[in-house]
Image (tube, grey):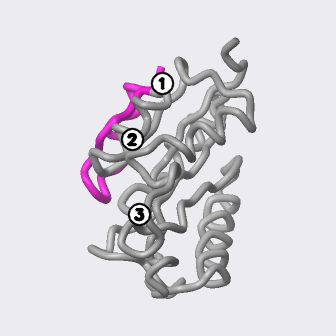
Amino acid sequence: MPGTNKAVFLDRDGVLNREMGDYVCRVEDFHILDNFEVLKDFQDRGYMLIVATNQGGLAKGWYNEDQLAEMHAHLRQSYQEKGIEFTDIFYCPHHPDFTGDCDCRKPKPGMLLKAIDKYDIDPAISYFIGDRERDVEAGTKAGVKGILIDSDQPISSIADQIL
């Protein structure tokens, strides 16, 4: 039985904050992209906004859980100031070279499936916006329509694909 809620899943780096070419390890390097208006529109249309991000830098020891929490608090606050609420932020702390295989690292759908279950989401009316093929692949495996954008591309340029 499909869920009753709809969601727009969002990759983090290159979608919500500027792509740095590698892991964003410090809040000082965390530059929010201006997607406020379009995400507010999605939210006003009844979509939950859920972040799903690979954070293999944790496994590599490049930053720790506290630093990641600080970056995510900054992300949430920046959007809250514009009236936008992220329902949740899911992240995969694993990296195949350091922690072996897992079910949550994109292109696997684990983070999306967890959110779908937790928030009673119907994947058939939900979307995943990401700047990597692995984002679209994870969405497809979870039954969600994946939308591929270029890194740092304004989400408003593909907003017409969100019905």
Numbered tag placed on residue 97 in the rendering: none
Q: Give the CA distance from mark 2 to mark 1.
A: 23 Å
Q: Secondary structure at mark 1?
A: loop
For the record, the magenta segment spans: 145-163
Which residue is the site of mark 2? 156
Please tell me which residue is depicted at 56% across the width and 40% down the height of the picture: 112
Query: Disc count in the image?
Result: 3
Q: Amino acid under label 1?
A: Gly
In the rendered image, the quadrant that contains the N terminus is top right
Looking at the rendered image, the disc whose residue lies closer to the viewer, 1 or 3, is 1
Expressed as whole percent of the image width and height from the top left, the position of residue 17 reads 44, 65
Which is more N-terminal, label 3 or label 1?
3
Instruction: Judge whether 124 appears above or below 90 on screen.
Output: above
Which residue is the site of mark 3? 13
Numbered tag placed on residue 143 in the rendering: 1
Q: Mark 1: few, some, or many residues within 10 Å (few <14, many ≥20)?
A: some
Depth check, front residue: 82 or 140: 140
